[in-house]
Image (cartoon, helix red, strand yellow):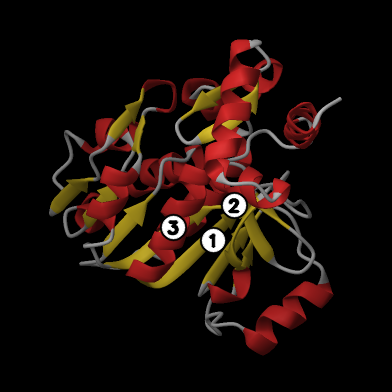
Amino acid sequence: MNKAEKRRATILDILSKVPASSIAILSDKLGVSTETLRKDLQQLAAEGKIIKRHGSVLLKDSSKNYLPFDLRRKMNRAYKSKIGAKASELVEEGDVILLENSTTSLAMIEALLGNKDLLQTLTIITNSFSIIALIEKEQVKGCFFLGGWIDFSQHATTGSIMEEFFKNIYVDKAFLSAAAVDDEGNLSSYYESDTIFQKIALQQAKQKVLMIGKDKYPKQALLKVANISEFSHIITATPLSEKLIEKIGECGQLSSENGIISV
């Protein structure tokens, strides 16, 4: 087996352990240039072993893990509704809020629809077509859609154009969903586009709210986003360890009034 074949075998091994990776991450792990890596990926794609999708690289057989939004929306609806309801209670009159494309964000909007008076004072920023569809007939103060490449299966926009738009917008509160949180409190994501979106959100928002589902802790994904100590509020369907709660309290920006909210 020559060097190129060994690299390709290593790429397949990495992708067998995570749902997706990126060219930048794989290049760093293998210690090769992105140009060399692209040649390897082209060969693996030609052999039908991988696919490239929206900045991510996946094993062809694992592409089924990239679940369509409509299917994800039907999963775990009960706890998502509870998280969404609690998140909606943090929204105040006149807020500019950011909602990413997640099924938990959708549950939050559904909860806000029950408070028409509050909804009319809000400005909503999102990259989610599903959220836009829910509020299109409502009288919100304003709505800004982050344009970019359209991912039809996820009902959202993605890519560098959307990211550049995003960097010019400031929001009062950003509501982000966790893909994975480990015992050290590190928030991570499986997809490069989600990672970039959440990092920009943390920079642009005055307050940050993290929503953690039942199957998201303790867990680690491929790409680090931030430590959850950077969030002002945490809403979780899974009890966090006492050690992690203590650590967050010591070094974080957690709101003393609301703090960690369990559902």
Few, some or many residues within 10 Å of mark 1 (<14, 14–19, 20+): many
- Residue 263 seen in render: no
The residue lying toward the viewer, choosing from 181 and 47, is 47
Determine contact: label 3, label 2, CB under 8 Å: no
Residue at 62% from the left image edge and 46% from the top image edge? 27
Give how far across and how far down residue 221 sits, in percent: 69, 48
Residue 175: give its label.
3
CA distance separating discs 3 and 2: 10 Å
Residue at 33% from the left image edge and 68% from the top image edge? 204
Residue type at mark 1 is Leu
Give how far across and how far down residue 64 sits, in percent: 64, 18
Residue at 52% from the left image edge and 82% from the top image edge? 257
**Label 2, on which residue?**
178
Helix, strand or loop under label 2: loop
CA distance separating discs 2 and 1: 7 Å
CA distance separating discs 3 and 1: 6 Å
**Label 1, on which residue?**
210
Quadrant containing the C terminus is bottom right
Q: Is residue 30 left or right of residue 189?
A: right
Residue at 62% from the left image edge and 19% from the top image edge? 43
Residue type at mark 2 is Ala
The residue lying toward the viewer, choosing from 8 and 116, is 8
Of pointers 2 and 1, the one earlier in the residue sequence = 2
Quadrant containing the N terminus is top right
- Tell me if residue 38 comes above or below residue 255 in the rendering: above
Residue 57 falls in image quadrant: top right
Determine contact: label 2, label 1, CB under 8 Å: yes
Residue type at mark 3 is Phe
